[in-house]
Amino acid sequence: MVDVISSNGWLNLALLAMEVSQMVTQGMWERDSMLLQLPHFTKELAKRCQENPGKSIETVFDLVEMEDDERRELLQMSDSQLMDIARFCNRFPNIDLTYEVLDSDNVGAGEDVSVHVSLERDLEGRTEVGPVDAPRYPKSKEEGWWLGVIRSIASQWMSRRQQLWKRIVEDDERCRANFDDWIFIDSGLLS
């Protein structure tokens, strides 16, 4: 669905379709706490994390950045439950995106541009990604990604490819246009 929508240049609909994919896979609404994707988390525990004195814990990254003893005190879980959460956090996508405009010295306004994009994932010592952690999804699911190059001025989807979560803004005066690169995962709520 996302490919059909984006090939027509409908950015807002494409973004909505991506969000729906994430919500369906995780069995939750966008307004729900992202922490509900974690094993053993309840709405009450997510609320306690958000109300954590000193620093609100709202994302997986906030939880990972905590000191072990602070996290243990906040979560009040058994060692095996904490290990389940650690496994989930270690599988959470950490993607580096780099790009290069090919033949960038000869690019002019209105011309087609070729861009080489590389996505690199830190596998944390694993040799393969494996299925998505999505206990509410009815079957095993592999991760999918979309990469979009979006022209900021027109808010029009320029191209897409398989492979959310990082944003790079390029302001190239030679082309007099701003482009944003976005990568979106189809199976989890990350921001």
Image: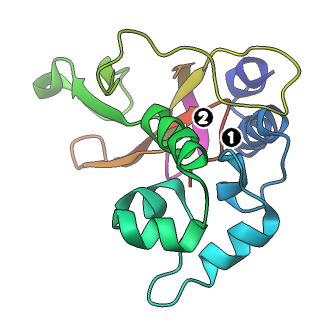
Residue toward you, 91 or 7:
91
Q: Is residue 164 visible?
A: no
In this picture the colour scheme is rainbow
N-terminal label among 2 and 1: 1
Range of residues picked out in magenta: 151-158
Q: Which residue is mark 2?
A: 157
The amino acid beneath tag 1 is Leu
Q: Percent position (x, y) of residue 130?
A: 54, 14
Would you say residue 153 sits in the magenta stretch?
Answer: yes
The amino acid beneath tag 2 is Trp
The tag on residue 138 is none
Residue toward you, 163 or 108:
163
Q: Residue at x 26, y 30 (%)?
A: 98
Q: Is residue 187 visible?
A: yes
Distance from the alpha carbon under mark 2 to that under mark 1? 5 Å
Residue 49 vertical position relative to residue 65 in the rendered view, above or below: below
Number of numbered discs visible in the structure rendering: 2
Residue that extends furthest to the top in the rendered view of this protein: 127
The tag on residue 11 is 1
Q: Percent position (x, y) of residue 45?
A: 71, 68
Could you tell me which secondary element the residue under label 2 belongs to?
A: strand
Q: Percent position (x, y) of residue 180?
A: 43, 45
- Quadrant location, the C terminus: bottom right
Residue that extends furthest to the left in the rendered view of this protein: 105
Q: Residue at x 64, y 24 (%)?
A: 132
Decide if residue 14 is on the left or right side of residue 28. Answer: left
Q: Residue at x 51, y 73 (%)?
A: 73
Could you say which quadrant of the image residue 67 lies in? bottom left
- Contact check, label 2 and label 1, Cβ < 8 Å: yes
Would you say residue 98 sits in the magenta stretch?
Answer: no
Using a 10 Å C-alpha cutoff, classify the residue at mark 1 as few (fewer than 14 neighbours), some (14 to 19) or many (20 or more).
Answer: many
Residue toward you, 100 or 31:
31
